[in-house]
Amino acid sequence: MLPDQFLQELKYRSDIEQVIGSYVNLRRRGRTLSGLCPFHSEKSPSFTVYPENQSFYCFGCQAGGDVINFIRRIENLDYMEAVRFLAQRAGMQVPENAGDSRTAQLRKRILELNRDAARYFHRNLMSEAGRPGRAYLIGRGLTKSTITRFGIGYAGEGWDGLTTAMRQMGYTREELVAAHLANESQKGGIYDVFRNRAIFPIIDLRGNVIAFGGRNLGEQGPKYLNSSDTLVFKKSRNLFALNFAKNSDRSELILCEGYMDVVSMHQAGFTNAVATLGTALTEEQSRLIAQYTGEVVLSYDSDGPGQKATRRATDLLEAAGVKIRVLSIPDAKDPDEYIKKFGAERFALLIEGSSSATDFAINNLRRENDLTTAEGKVSFLKQFAVLMADLPSPIEREVYLSKICRELEVDKAAIAGQIEREQKKRSYRNRKREERELIAPPAKGRTEADRADELLQRQLPREMKAAERLLRYLLRHPDRAEWLRDRLPESYLPGENDRALYRILLQRGLSGQELTLAALGETLPPQAVDRVTRWMLPGAPAVTDEEAEDCLNCLQSHAAQMSREELGQLSGEALRQYIENLNRAKNRRGE
C-alpha cells in the first residue's frame, strides 16, 4: 500500500486541470471546466473537471475519479503504472516497500510523541512553573474546565524542557525534529521549538494530536507560532476545534481567525466555532467545511486584513457550495473582545443578524467605486448586474435592484436589462449542461455483480438505497467507522458491490487511513471509483446522522427477516447482531 502522505503530495503536484488539459480541450464554465469526453464518442461535451476537489466526471459514460484514475484510463495503465507515470512527471520518487514501512512507523511515532508532548505541556501549565501561562489564560477569561477541555498547556522559557522530557521517555532526536517539536542548532544539538508560549493542541477528527499552536507570552518572536507541516499534519487541510464543532447541535459553523476566539466562543456556548491554522482559508479547508455543514458564519476581525480575509473566504466557500453569512462586530476588534464586553447573549443576537454574502459583496463594491462620480457609478452598476445575475431568487434580486436604483437615482429598467443579458448568458450555459447530463450512459464493462445489483434494485429498492446512503455517510464520516462496524455486519448489505466497498471503507476508516479518491483508487476497481466520484461531486447531498440511523434500522429490519438458508451462513458477530435485531423487532410488535 502506498502511504497516504505520498498520494496526497502526488495529487497536489499533479494539478488535474493541467494534466487533463494536455489530453482534452477544456473550456471554463464558472467553477468547472468541460470538454468532449476522451473515453466515449460524443458531439456535445459531457466531460467535466472540478478543480475545487481535483476530480473529473463524465455525465455521458459515468467515468470519474481523480488525476490518477484519469491517467490510468487514458494511458491504459494499471494503478501503480499510472502513479509512476505521474510521479515521473512531478519529479517525485515512488516509495519502495521498505520506505513505506519506515514512513508508517515514523508517522505512528510522531502521533505518540505529540500525545505525550501535549500531556507534558498541560502538566507544565498546572505546575508552579506554569504560573505565567495560567496568568495569561485566566486574564483572557478562560475557566479551568475550558483549559482542560482543550488541553491547553504551557511551554517554559528554557531551551530544552520538552526535548529533555521526551528523550527521557525514549523518543529520538530524529523523531522530535520530524514532529517539529525541536529544531537543530548550528552546534549540532537540538532545542525546543515552543518556548514561553501558551500551547494549543491541534486535534484531528479521530482524536489524534497532530500539531500545536503557541501564543507568545513575551516580547520577542511572532505573536503566534504554529507547527510546520509534518507527516501527520498539513495546516492547509485542517481546522482548529473541528473535532468538537462537528458534534455541535448547531447546524452552521462559525469560522474565526484565531485560537482564542474559538476557545472563548466555545466557553460562551458557541460550540460550532472553528479556526484556520495560522493561514488564510484554503481550498482544501473549504472542501472540508462543506463535508460538515451547508452554512458558515464568517467571524473575522473588523480590521483591514480581516476584511480581506472575509472576501477570500467568501469566494472559496461559495465555490465549495457553502452558504455564507458575514458577521459584523461593532465596538470590538474580534469575537473574543465582544463577548467579554457585552456577553454571550448579545453575541448570539449579532449572529442572528449577520448579513448575507450578497450584502457583504455589495458593500465591497461601494468601497471599491467612487459613487460620487458618473464613472464610479457606471463601474459599480456593471459589477452589481453581474452579482445580481448570480442570485437564484427573483424576489431577492428585485429587493436589491429596487434598493440600489433608489439610492443611486438611476433608471431601474436599464439595470434590469443589463441583469437580464447576464442571465441569458448563464441560462444558455446551464441548458447545455442539462442536455449533456441527459445523455444515457452506455452499458459496458458490466460484471455479474452489476447485473445482480440491478435485479436487487428492483426487488429491494428501499434496502439498496439505504445501503448506498450508509456508504456515502461512511465516506464523509470515517470517524464513524467503529460505530458502523458494531451495528452493521457486512452481510446486511444486499448487494455484492456494496459489501465489497463497505469492507474497504470500513477497514481504512478503522485504521485511520484517508478516504480520498487517490487512496481508494489503489484498492477499488474503476467502476467503484466512478461511483464514489459521483458521491463526492461538489454539491452532492450529504447524509445526516439521523438519516444514517434510519438507513441502519432499515437494513437491520431486513436482516431480521432472513431465510433459513441465509441464516445458516451467518456466524460470530453477524449471528449475534441478527438475534438482537430479531428480539428488537419482537419487542416493537409487543410479542
Image (tube, rainbow, N blue to C red):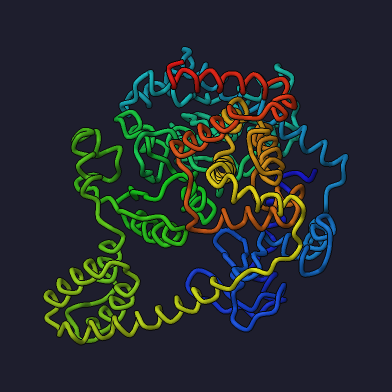
The answer to whether 534 is drawn above or below residue 34 in the figure is above
Q: Residue at x 46, y 17 (%)?
A: 587
Where is residue 89 shown, x and y percent of the image?
78, 65
Q: Residue at x 71, y 57 (%)?
A: 527
Q: Residue at x 49, y 42 (%)?
A: 239
Q: Nearer the viewer, residue 433 or 88?
A: 433
Work out whether residue 312 can be spotted. yes
Q: Nearer the viewer, residue 79 or 84?
A: 79
Q: Nearer the viewer, residue 153 or 572?
A: 572
503 sits left or right of 322 in the view: right
The answer to whether 194 is drawn above or below residue 411 in the figure is above
85 sits left or right of 510 in the view: right
The answer to whether 327 is drawn above or below residue 437 in the figure is above
Quadrant location of residue 72?
A: bottom right
163 sits left or right of 259 in the view: right
Q: Nearer the viewer, residue 544 or 477?
A: 544
Where is residue 542 shown, x and y percent of the image?
48, 48
Quadrant location of residue 474?
A: top right
